[in-house]
Image (cartoon, rainbow, N blue to C red):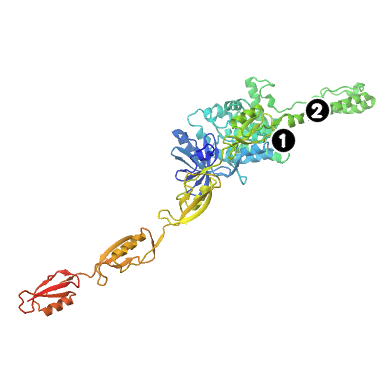
Amino acid sequence: MTDDVGTQVGDRLVGRVLDGRYRVGSRVAKGGMATVYEALDMRLDRIIALKVMHLGMGDDAEFGRRFVAEARAAAKLSHPNVVAVFDQGNDHDTLFLAMEYVPGRTLRDVIRQQSPLPPARALDLLAPVLSALSAAHDAGIVHRDIKPENVLISNDGTIKVADFGLARAVTTTGNTATQGLLMGTVSYLAPELVTDGRADARSDVYSAGILLYELLTGNKPHTGDTPIQVAYAHVHADVPAPSLVVPGIPPYVDALVQRATARERDLRPADARVFSRQVHRVRNAIEEGLPDDPELTGDLTVPIQQMRQDNEYDDGYSRGNGYAEHQPRNDTIVVPYEPPTNPMPQQSLLRPHGSTRQAGPAVAQSAPVLVRQAPRQSRGRGFIAMFAVLALALGVGSAAWFYGVHRYTSTPVLVSLTAAEASTKAAEDGLTTTLANQDYSEDVPQGAVMKTDPEPGARIRKNGEVALTVSKGPERYRVPQLAGLDEEAARRALESIKLNVGQVSQAYSESVPTGRVIVFSPKFDSVMKPGDAVNLAISRGKKPIGVPDLTGKPVREATRTLKKAGFVVGRTDQYDEKVPEGRVISQTPNSGTLFAKDKVALVVSKGPALRDVPNVRSKKLVDAQRILTEAGFQVKVVKAQFNLGLNLVAAQSPAAGQKAKPGTVVTVTVL
């Protein structure tokens, strides 16, 4: 096999039947611990998703036991926002899950293409995820691996969460908690999973909070060069407010995210159902168009503030360090007051000491007097106003430059490079890359970058992330084993790997049942392009054979004729007074149609039944002839050597009492 043949061809699971039931089709996705295939459930004739654990995982008995237990628990979870688990199995150490097939896209695709999302849209996407998690938490199931890749969006817009229970089975294979967890995506891990490996419903809440942050900002809150660095950040750093990245997000949305992602699990919502109620309150506030809701913000923020105060006290952090930079900004802005050159009489400016509410009116009342009596002050104020306008314009311009130009750079040309080369080149511009997708290409070599998002030359934030689509080489598939499948199942098996049904012919078969595939071409395991056709020969069943009527024919001729037609011949013999010996008296059946190897029974004549030869000794010849003739025999007369002329029968052959066929010649000897 050449190197340009696609990965589907190299995947030996494609076309294989697992557990005698699931025919593996094209590969849908591949993760760190499992690969997902589109498959055909041949028993129920439906398309499913088959998640197959990577080789070697089935070798661990403890893992296998936990895998089965978790799969059974997940299968009991029935909810419209949960991907259903139909079956689990182990086919020669190949562990797999049979699940509901959800054609569409993942939440990762939405984040990549549309983020940052408006808060209302982000919460609408999160709500079904929390609904699924609520059902799981009510059933005592913790997901442990909430991330955008596990949130599926069907073509009709239904949102479903996949992989319930799988994470727990995967992380109990004998590794330490941290080692097992770091095998997967660390960007969504709750701190307690990193520190002690223990997960509960609040761990899922944390992951869902990270998910919400990413929907709102388009970025993950914690990044690092290695998974360990990211995990460390989850333990030692708070998730920042989304509004620090995307200005304009309401304070109560910031508070919602930070409450769900509190590092101390006791400060998070108790489970997904509590978190869902908080999301509903925030969504209502957005619907009402409230830029802020102090009561709602306070309800969500107070526990977080208390936590930070406690941590500052316990850890010895000052207000200027630790968590203080994330505190809500409630500072009072102090504007310097310049007294007029010709002040008002002293008594007109007197106010009770410390009375801030009266200070404003005093200045306002004195302003008209100052304008009339001191025009120089007016020029001073005009200068201050002009300076303020210039400062404001400079600030707006600087902000526009910062947010519109300074923060952005151009996406480099990474097409045709390998993923590693693209990552190196992007790093030269301060960018990171992520493998977003893989696709087939007849032109781009396998492993090379086909396209990027953003496209080359497009604007991208500095330190941003470029999504790579890497070529899997030419798309090729192996022809699956179709012999014995009914025509519809064969069509589905071919469609699942993008092959078409070509010519369909029908032929009789003595071994393949009606409607099933007898042969197909090209043959099994042939490599083909998408859209290529496979010709099928469908069985019409056994070929019917007309039964000839051979009654009265010699048995040899009848037997030869029936065997030549493909029948099995049965024979019985019996006497018959009318049908000559050796000829067919009757035949069953003697008309209609049968199939090859069916039996035709013949009854063959033995001729008339044997009769007793009468005793004619000592009888006169005339009487002897009459008796023998009436008995059905023929008579032959032989005179004795010493004939005396008496015409008496002296001997007979066959002798009296013997059995003989009718018509047999009886020889009598007369004296």
Q: Residue 533, how many percent across, how many down?
A: 53, 49
Q: Seen from this angle, which residue lies furthest front?
A: 641
Label 1 sits on a secondary structure element that is loop
Residue 404, numbered circle:
none
Looking at the image, which is closer to me, 300 or 638? 638
At x 62%, y 21%, the residue is 314
Looking at the image, which is closer to me, 71 or 91? 91
- Where residue 245 sits, quadrant-wise, is top right
- Relative to 339, say whether 578 is above or below: below
Q: Residue 635, how many percent across, how many down?
A: 15, 75
Label 2 sits on a secondary structure element that is helix
- Where residue 285 sits, quadrant-wise, is top right
Disc 2 marks a residue whose amino acid type is: Leu
Q: Residue 657, how many percent across, how many down?
A: 13, 70
Q: Which residue is mark 1?
A: 293
Label 1 Cα neighbours within 10 Å, binned few <14 / some 14-19 / many ≥20? some
Quarter of the image that includes the C terminus: bottom left
Q: Residue 112, how many percent across, how many down?
A: 64, 37
Q: Is residue 9 left or right of residue 657?
A: right
- Relative to 463, say whether 155 is above or below: below
Residue 394, numbered circle:
2
Looking at the image, which is closer to me, 477 or 150? 477
- Relative to 308, say whether 90 is above or below: below
Disc 1 marks a residue whose amino acid type is: Asp
Q: Could you give the CA–CA distance between mark 1 and mark 2, rounded to whole angstroms?
A: 32 Å
Q: Is residue 192 left or right of residue 326?
A: left
Q: Is residue 521 left or right of residue 350?
A: left
| Label 1 vs label 2, nearer the camera | 2
Q: Earlier in the sequence, mark 1 or mark 2?
A: 1
